[in-house]
Amino acid sequence: MSMDRSGAKVARKRVGIAIGLLAALFCASSLRAQTPDEHTKHHPGAASAAGQPGGMSPSAAGTGAGAGDGAGMMEGMGEMMKNMGAPAPKALYPSLMDLPDLPPEKRDELQRAAHDRMKSGTDLMAEAFDQLVKAAPTNDFVAMQAATTKLREGVARFDSGLAAHRAIAEGKDPRALAVQWFKGQMNLPEPPSHAGARGPGWWGLSWEHLILMALLVAFAAVMMAMYFFKMRRAAALFGRLESDPGRPPPGAAPPLAGTPGPSTPGPPPGGRTSPPEGQPPPPAAASNDAPSEAPAPAGTNAAPPIASATAPPLTANWKGQLRIGSIVVETPSVKTFRLLPTSSDRVLPFTFVPGQFLNVAFWIGGARMNRSYSISSAPTQREYVEVTVRREPRGAVSRHIVDLLRVGSLIEASGPVGKFTFDGTEAESIVLIAGGVGITPMMSIARYLTELAWAGDIFFLYACKAPTDFIFAKELAALQQANSRLHVTIAMSRPEGADWKGTRGHINKELLAQAVPNIASRRIHLCGPPAMMDAIKAALIELGAPPEQVRTETFGATKPTPVPAGTTSAPAAPATGPLVTFSTNNKLAKIKAGQTVLELSEELGIGIQNSCRVGTCGICKVKMTSGEVEMAVQDALDEGDKASGMILACQAKPTSDIAVEA
């Protein structure tokens, strides 16, 4: 009995399912029988909508035939594009994106394609219903599952065609539908629409964007202000380094005659400022202020032509400015500067003797500094003068010259001065011994004697560390080829790693005796580092060279080194010497035994300008108005200086109470 009842229930359920399927099939059949003309009758606004901007509205995506119609519609459109048969018709969605630009005939074609898809979906659904009706009574679950899949595909096709019809009819933007579909596929949340959401700010931007932009602008303004401040500080530092038009510090010497203020290096012209390392300077004709005539070849008697018929008289009292015409790199730390006259006659305002030097002055860090540099060119070159400068790691002036000066820069100079000279009239032969940058005055002498075709023998001995430190290597080789009486010996102490086949080691007694026959009878000039000079002077004494035949040149004597704090040292000697009065600064003090006027002035903070500190440059000249002093070296004083009471502060040691104008 119970089995009969359960069978009746199953039968009733199957009948209900069949009735529902038949009803759905009836509806689908009515849709399947609909023609395009009938569809147009049901949608009278579709034809008029053909001239309006088309697109899919959000309602078509979100409120279609059931929940999830937006995603279903797009899925259906995808299925519709894949399953319309072969050959596949043109996809609807790209055409919908072009709706604003489609002509009327294209819109009609699009409507027919949408109708065909609806009909295809209806047919597919009807076929699925038939399969489902047949499979349900037999419990064929595989067939039922296939029918269900086919039914969903048919619904998707139908839904996509319907959505296309609605997009054409309603005239909405299809791009909005695309965005909404993409957000649905990516599970992106919709923007907040509640009342508390922050509205747009200025220019259509949100307040968050405006605040962020304001912070970025403020940050950029702060960074620009900091950069501007740093650049002002850097400019002020370089201004102090290159020129200081302000008042000199107490006790500083006044500017040299003819110079309204500190020298200001001019900007370098375009292109190179110096030829390659080891090459001679560029031809003089390359500059408007350079001489137009080339110098006479080495080894000839002919002197180069002079632009002015009357040369200025030889004087050590010239003061003025010279302009840098060219710069030649001799070694990584040594440069040669060709200095030209600033006057229009293109001739130097002074003459000099080989072996002399120039005094130069610069304002560096607010202080006036003086240095002396030997002239390396020959005096026969009347249109220019050359000085060769080595960059000392701790030398303020040499670093300023080598690092900062450029072609066109003006240099404040005076001179020439010095008695380390030789013009060929003092002896029948000459021995030139140099070390390092001490080669500069020797080159001036060797160049001059070669250009003069001097008949005497020239023995040139030079010492350096390695080939990279060999100053004037090519120039000296050229002089040796042009002058058969020039005998050159080069000694290198550290030539390791270089292809050097010459003498290795230092210049010693044996090398001197070998390189210079009968050296004791010859005039000798010696210039180089103090330790080298002391060793060679001792060797010369052993070889029998008379001290009066040896001339030396020394620059940059160091100041006494103070005893470091905390170390044991002998107590300072009391100042029991004569009283020294510095009238300009209204200071006076007793001097210590062996102390010079310059050293006492430095203890009292009185700025007496100085350079060589060995009595040859003349920078430290001061006028003594009363008293007596003794000076070991007076090379920088001429007869006029002595008659007017000038003394060299670096050499003067009072023998009585004195007064000086400092």
Image: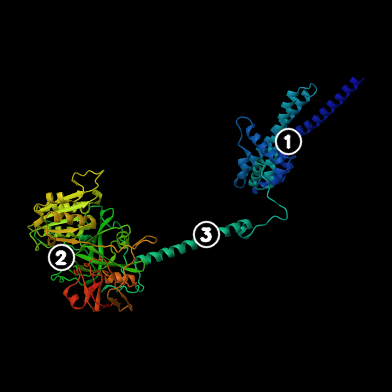
Q: Which residue lies under the disc numbered 1?
A: 34
> How does the figure colour the protein chain or chains?
rainbow
| Alpha carbons under labels 3 and 1: distance apart | 68 Å
Disc marking residue 220: 3
- The answer to whether residue 203 is left or right of residue 316 is right
Identify residue type, mark 2: Val
| Alpha carbons under labels 2 and 3: distance apart | 62 Å
Q: Closer to the camera, 414 or 427?
A: 427
Mark nearer the N terminus (3 vs 1): 1
Query: Which residue corresponds to the image point at 55% horizontal and 61% vertical from the top-left?
Result: 218
**Which image quarter holds the N terminus?**
top right
Q: Is residue 185 above or below residue 360?
A: above
- The answer to whether residue 72 is left or right of residue 339 is right
Mark nearer the N terminus (1 vs 2): 1
Mark nearer the N terminus (2 vs 3): 3
Query: Which residue corresponds to the image point at 59% horizontal and 57% vertical from the top-left?
Result: 212
x, y percent for residue 642: 18, 75
Dot 1: element: loop
Closer to viewer: mark 3 or mark 1: 3
Say which quarter of the image contains residue 369. Answer: bottom left
x, y percent for residue 148: 73, 29
x, y percent for residue 387: 23, 61
| Alpha carbons under labels 1 and 2: distance apart | 122 Å
> How packed is label 2: few (under 14 Cα within 10 Å), some, or many (20 or more)?
many
Dot 3: element: helix
Q: Residue furthest right?
A: 1
Dot 2: element: loop
Disc marking residue 353: 2
Identify residue type, mark 3: Ala
Identify residue type, mark 1: Gln
